[in-house]
Structures are given as C-alpha cells and as structure tokens.
Amino acid sequence: MEGEGLMRSGGCKRERQAWFRRGLALLWLMVAAGWSIGIVPAAQGSPAGAVGDAARGRNLFNGKGVCFYCHGLDAHPDQLPQLAQDTASYVAHLDPKPPHLREPLGLKMTGDKERFRLIREGHVGTGMLPDANLSDQEIHDLLAYLAILRSPAASKGESHP
Ligand code: HEC
C-alpha cells in the first residue's frame, strides 16, 4: 500500500515528534490551568486559616446572614430593622440579649474558631439560630468583618465611659 511506505519514511517520524511536542505543551497547559483553578478555592474554602473579605462580610451581616435582625444594622444595637411584630418582640425578649459586637470588653468569645462554630451551629439555649445557608467562605467573610468591628478604630468615639 502507498500509505505504509509513507509511514516508514523519515518525514512521518518528524511529524510524529512534532505532535508529541505539541501534546506535551498541551499537557503542561492543562496541569497549569488545573493547578490555578484547583488551588485557589481549596485555600479559601478550608475552615482553618482561610482569609475572609470584610466588605462581603458586612453585606452578609446586613443581608443574607440576617445578623442585623438581632445585632443591629452594621452591628449598632440601636439600629434594629423594622421587623414583623412577632419577630420584633421575639428579638426584644431574647435572654441573654444580643451582645454589642463593637465593644470587645463585653464579648465572651476569644477566638475565630469558636465564633465560626457559633455562627455555623448557633447557640443552644439562646436566640441565635444555626445558619445552614452560609458557606464556610461566607462565615470567614463575616469573621473578617467582626474583627474590624472589634478593632479600636471601629469603636472609637462610641464607648465613652
Ligand atoms: C436571633 C437573634 C440573633 C441573630 C439572628 C444573630 N445573633 Fe449573634 N448572638 C445573639 C445572641 C442572643 C448572642 C449571645 C449569646 C450568648 O451570650 O450566649 C449572640 C452572640 C454572638 C456572638 C458572640 C459574641 C461574644 O460574646 O463574643 C457573635 C460573634 C455573633 N453573635 C455574631 C453573629 C453573626 C455573625 C450573625 C449572623 C450570621 C448573628 N450573630 C446572628 C443573637 C443573634
């Protein structure tokens, strides 16, 4: 056959080498792409040591996370939203009361691991419900926001004795 003759010729061999090199290059591209898309979510999504985005955390606090129902808009306890009558009265009668998240001295929790669990699982026996709607990353965003609230700059001018 004509084709068989061609297959054995040097020209075909060179062509196969070219294809091999192109294949290698493609493989490298795939590995690099897989690495870049695989590694980023892994680093952000892990509960330990993940980095949160405080701006997104603030939006979650005043939105999807419904934290502001009890802790107030932007964590100002005197700025509770207008809620339905029964929800408002439920929040008003919480015991213990929702703490002022901008006043570090009045807070009990000392670490983000603890806070993460509190937000994920809720408080047994208090008004703070578990929030299954939030992803790990969203909780880290909230934690980043809460950390800013606790910093001296955030409470400056508010906590005069
Ligand atoms: C239904 C009311 C309610 C909602 C909604 C709520 N909390 Fe709370 N939260 C409380 C109460 C009450 C406590 C105090 C519980 C206690 O002292 O045992 C608390 C405690 C906390 C604490 C611990 C403060 C400390 O003492 O160190 C943090 C942090 C916190 N909440 C953050 C959040 C975040 C973030 C959200 C939204 C995802 C949220 N809360 C939603 C009522 C609420």
Image (cartoon, helix red, strand yellow):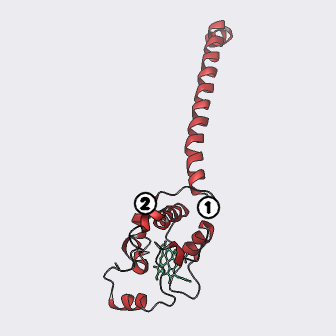
Position of residue 129 measured from the top left corner of the image (x, y, whole percent)? 51, 81
Residue 83 visible in the current orientation: yes
Check the image and report above or below for 106 versus 138.
below
Q: Nearer the viewer, residue 126 or 24?
A: 126
Mark 2 or 1 closer to N-term?
Answer: 1
Q: In the displayed orientation, state which residue is furthest to the right.
A: 8
**Callout 1: CB less than 8 Å from ligand 1:** no
Question: According to the image, label 2 marks what residue?
Answer: 56
Residue 47's label in the rendered image is 1
Amino acid type of the residue that numbered disc 2 sits on in the rendered structure:
Arg
Amino acid type of the residue that numbered disc 1 sits on in the rendered structure:
Pro
Q: In the displayed orientation, state which residue is furthest to the left.
A: 82
- Cα–Cα span, label 2 and label 1: 17 Å
Q: Quadrant of residue 2?
A: top right
Helix, strand or loop at disc 2?
Answer: helix
Q: In the displayed orientation, state which residue is furthest to the front.
A: 161
Name the residue rendered at 47%, 74% in the picture.
Answer: 101
> Mark 1 packing: few (<14 Cα in 10 Å), some, or many (20+)?
some
